[in-house]
Image: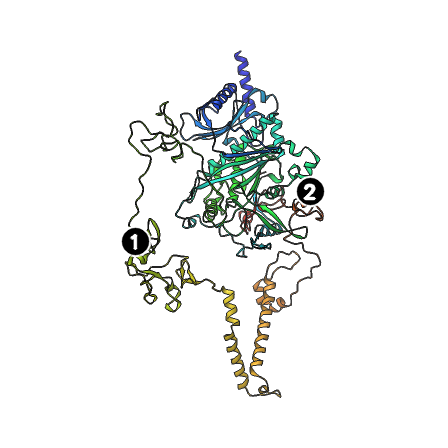
Amino acid sequence: MLHCKLLVWWILTTLCDAQFNKYITHFEPLTYNSEEIHSHHLRHERSINSNPCVNIKFHAHGRHFHLRLRRDVSIFAPDLQVDSPTGILNQFNTSHIYEGTLWGEENTKAFGSIRNGIFDGNIHTEKGTYYVERTNKYFSDERAQRFHSLIYHERDIKDHHSGFGGCGITDDVLKWMHNISNSAVEEDSTTSNLKLNKPKNKDIKLTHYFEDYRDINARIRREVPTQRVCSLYIQTDTLLWDHIHNQEKDPTKTREEITSLIAQHVKAVNHIYQKENFTKYQGIKFVVQRITINDSSACDTEEKIKTNHFCSRNIDVSNFLNLNSQMNHDAFCLAYIFTYRDFSEGTLGLAWVASPQGASGGVCEKYKLYSENVNGRPVQIKRSLNTGIITFVNYNTRVPLKVSQLTLAHEIGHNFGSPHDFPDECRPGGSKGNYIMFASATSGDRPNNIRFSHCSIGNMSAVLEALFANEKRLCFQEDKGAFCGNKIVEVNEQCDCGYNEEECNDKCCYPRQSVLLPNDKKQCTRRPGTKCSALCPPSVHKPNYTTVCNEKTRVCLAGECVGSICLQHAKEECFLSKSGGTPEKLCELSCQNKGDPTTCIPQMDSSNNAIKLSSGAPCDDFRGYCDVFQKCRAVHADGPLARLKNLLFNPNTLMTVEEWITVSLNSRPSTSKLNYSNFSGALVGRFIIRCFFIIVMGAFIKCCAVHTPSSNPKQPPARRISDTLRQPAQSLRRKFPRQHRTVPQLNQAPPTYPETLGLSQAPNPRRPGPSQGGLAHGYGESSGHYNRPKKGQAKLTAHDSYAAAYPGGNRLEMRKHKV
């Protein structure tokens, strides 16, 4: 008998040491009593107790695990709606979703699901994260019968392939993406005319991507908003259903496994985002509000296959996202599709990037019209750009939980406004690894792999600031779910000092987990014999006009920094006019006697220095604003080109030159038969001036043309300035070869689906499928595409991989795994 046990153990150990796929290099089997756990789950499901514990004990990786789990209701919204192709599933059960800790261990967290007595999920400890998965996800042979689940450590997730996943784009794809993200069309409510919502600034700006995150802190509003919940709409397609149903063999179990998969990924994303400090916006949370599970009945007839483009198995990744974006998702913060499609070049995810201003896309984006060129015809297509997709398969291998969870966190990072990490200080690599927004997918076993870099935090904070400042549509909701341990006193709570004794600093309150908590006492209640109050007394404002704020330009009124400093002296604020001095003088805070503009004088501080208005404050009676140098700038100040134009073509300047030429001509003695006195001096002067400017501008354009580089391979290379200085005549004689070939339109849209656009007579209609020649949306180098150079292709340098990566604000962002 002993020999048999040793033989079985040797077989299992040999099996575990083998690498069963290209990601997980080592795992250990789990064989605890699942029937007992299942009975506890059913009993607790029927229990009148609000949240009883389920205990799971097992031994693996040289240590003992004791999970204490409770039902998790924080992932799904109270009004969760679950759909199927046949309609709404009214009685959908989510009681199999759990969360908890390791008993007796601090700083631990566990979450996942319990189905048929088998736990499947994450276990976070101080020595790393363990992942527990059901055996039938990876094995279909006799191993699935010998042990029901397996456990592996995050350090056992490896990628043995080499190379660097770069980020690049071709010129025509870049042009098309920029046009789409900046081509939103808005319909005027009073007329039926459609107006193109062009960006205010025609130049492509990159400032918000590489802005120092510390500068953003200065723009955060004083009031911290309470809306922190981003609602999610998650769909799963038929390919994911077919894959999971092949493992579960039962429709009910398949739906439970799909909801478990969704819950684990959203919980993992919350675990990452709620720990981050996006300046003043902490505690960002994601809640699933709607789920659509497309089972095999969605594509079981020829008619459904023709009308439902998601039924096609050969859709490239960008067209797959495009299908999701063509639906109206206004009711949700973000809308994602989970699939089991093996996209080309190791693609794991794709999403639109948010921008704090200008281009459309990202979190909370509305469903609206976008203008584009389809098959040579200008059309307007409605899209929701608050979308993304992820897949769970890569090169015909299911990706581990860690990789897919980080992929979802990465793509949502794009939706919140973060591009790939840049510059090099935000992608350090090395022993600590790269951050979440690194261009290539990571195995997740390094400390930085589950964190955002300060570059990403700065970019995402800028988008959040734009949302909460009402510069963009805000769709966040308040967290209505009460939870003991979040340090917020909610319904049915007497107090809330934290999750455990370590977090709780209140001697009068029991935390969520306490070894001192009696059996008859509930969590988040006051300790017996204490004389404490959970309510703070109302705050009393300081007297008005006594507290100076906002760089000594304001005083507090009723607890808010809204009053002018002039109120301290019983005066009112006024503006100095241009006749009163220089632009610097106009940005000095001035006060006057009430109703008497003649008494307007600058206000001095205690050091007898003039008090300056803050940047952005109005000046010159609202005809200008103060810049960062405390100079008053006119609201419609001319730029350098306009000033040059005014200098050269100003009527006074032209009149001065004309008078000089006229005087010079009339004062010179006539030495030819032609008498200049017979002509009007003014007419001759104007003619000479115009000829002079035409010659100068022609020579200037000609010289600039030969020195301007071109992306056209048929054009000759640009000349150097030194060549022109040595041989000026050759530059003026240089001619460009005539082009006979037709240049393709750079703003030509990729193939779409005429049926979805309402174009019944569209030329060359295409079904979703692989590319049929030419540039197809989703293939080739692209902004945000997670690419790796093919075999024989030169590797990209750090500079090349990020050059022109995000020129327009919003881009399709694709995550690819390293191959």
Q: Report x, y in % for residue 811.
A: 56, 47
Location of residue 393 with respect to 580 vertically, above or below: above
Instruction: Give the residue at mark 1.
Output: 545
**Element at badge 2?**
loop
Q: Is residue 815 visible?
A: no
Count the marks: 2
Q: Report x, y in % for residue 203.
A: 54, 56
The amino acid at mark 1 is: Tyr
- Mark 2 Cα shell of 10 Å, populated few (<14), some (14-19), many (≥20): some
Name the residue furthest front. Answer: 190
Residue occupying the point 57% across, 73% down: 693
Say the numbered circle drawn on residue 767. 2
| Left or right placement of residue 107 versus residue 766 in this view | left
- Do the CB atoms of the residues marked 2 and 1 lie less than 8 Å apart? no
Q: Report x, y in % for residue 122.
A: 49, 30
Q: Is residue 39 visible?
A: yes
Question: Which mark is in front, 2 or 1?
Answer: 1
Front residue of 498/457: it is: 498
The amino acid at mark 2 is: Arg
The scheme the figure's colours follow is rainbow
Front residue of 509/694: it is: 509
Mark closer to the chain start, 2 or 1: 1
Front residue of 489/199: it is: 489
Which image quarter is the C terminus in? Answer: top right
